[in-house]
Image (cartoon, grey):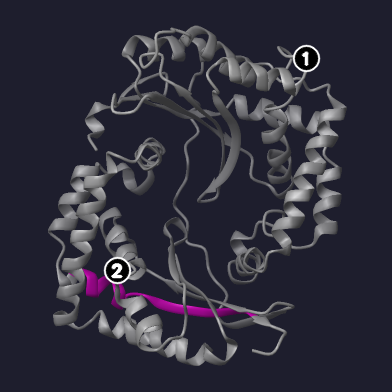
Amino acid sequence: MDFSKLVSKNGIYLYEDNDFNTITIKLNFLAPSSNRDCAILDVLCEYLGRSNKKFNSDDDIIKKQQELYDLELNFANQFYSNQKVFSLYANLISMNAISDDYSADAFGFLNDMLRHPNFDDEEMLEVVKRNLLADLELDISDNEVYASSMYERKVIPEDNRVYENNTDIEYLRKMINSITLEDLKKEYEYIMKHFHSGLVFGNITQEQFNSFVDTMSLEPSTKKLNFDRDVQTVEGDIEVEKDSEQSYIYVTYDFDELTAAKLRVLNNIFNSSSGICYELLRDKYGLVYSFYVDIMFYLRKLYFYSEIDYSKKEKFLETLDEIIETLQDKEKLTRLLSQTKNNLAMQEYNLSENKDSMFEILNKYILEFYGNEDRATVNKQIEEMTEEDVAGVVKALRRKNVFMVRSSENE
């Protein structure tokens, strides 16, 4: 991926790629991240897509999207480090791929949906609240979602997101039902003052891109994303009990500063289906069927996760120690590192065929993830990485705790 192809105007970046017959757009705004703000943002995201002064009803909005060749539009929010980012996402057929030039109509629609929300629709607000609560209740009933939420709450308390990780439906119902149209309006007004960056990707010309930027008329805020975090985790073992058939385990480690290249190598070594973790945890000892490692880059943590029988907990932990010890063995590490480099090179080769992956990488680049390193530089660093480099990263891992959601049923 050639980052030198990126051009920008008013904080919005263009990456032309005529291999796809679509145009994908994302506009990023900084948003408040308090407990209540998180709830308001969830309501606001659905509300913005369904109530607008330019349209009489949400059916009219859907009809307009269909007229625009099924233009896809949604609003979303997520945490990056300790900062909430609100985004508009759109995907549409490229006007260069069909005979109809509808760019002004399509870009005008996106501007209308962003700029002209209707904050007087009490009926739609109630519909949105009911839908959100139904989705949250469904999520909470899922044991794996419950385990993930409890892990966040119990293990990383300084990063605790009370609303987002809550498993008490009555608490959530009270929080969401307290949200008013005035709350949505204030949240929206804050967001619109804090435009951060945007990305336009795909089969689109420079002239069309300029038309889009001019239509949206956004000026970037001087406020930046802050990724510098060192959140402390709880020490020792933590267990909670759940009425489920399966237990879930999270084993958290601290790590020293990682470069983007080391992050990609470590992630592949741990998560590859032909890698060391599956080789020992599944194939050799039969402890788990599925398994993954998640690297929380800006919290400087990673965790090993799996569904597991409670009786296999100690063997699971012993095997993690064995994995880390194995990754100090130069002969074995040589094979694993060679395999990893081949896997990553193949992923890079196939990247140009995956629009969604390319778009996500580009968006992280403009958000200045991983020090805003150029992809070619990172790939060169991976090629030059040695067994000693990998062994040093793994040796620096420090186990902090073991968190388990223990099944209350017989296993």
Residue 28 within the magenta-colored segment of the rendering:
no
| The magenta segment | 389-405
Residue 398 within the magenta-colored segment of the rendering:
yes
Q: Are marks 1 and 2 in contact (CB under 8 Å)?
A: no
Q: Quadrant of the C terminus?
A: bottom right
* In-image side of 250 versus 206 (left or right): right
* In-image side of 179 versus 249 (left or right): right
Q: Can you say whether 365 is above or below 99 in the image?
A: below
Q: Write the residue at 62% across / 30% down.
A: 191
Q: Can you say whether 64 is above or below 352 in the image?
A: above
* Front residue of this view, candidates 123 and 397: 123
The residue indicated by pointer 1 is 56
Q: Secondary structure at mark 2?
A: helix
Disc 1 residue type (three-letter): Asn
Q: Is residue 299 visible?
A: yes
* In-image side of 259 versus 178 (left or right): left
Specify few, some or many for label 2: CA neighbours under 10 Å numbering under 14, 14-19, or 20 or more. many
Q: Position of residue 202 (x, y in %)?
A: 35, 26
Disc 2 residue type (three-letter): Ile
Q: Position of residue 288 (x, y in %)?
A: 47, 80
Q: Position of residue 174 (x, y in %)?
A: 86, 50
* Front residue of this view, candidates 79 and 249: 249
Q: Position of residue 362 (x, y in %)?
A: 35, 37
Tell me where residue 330 sits by quadrant: bottom left
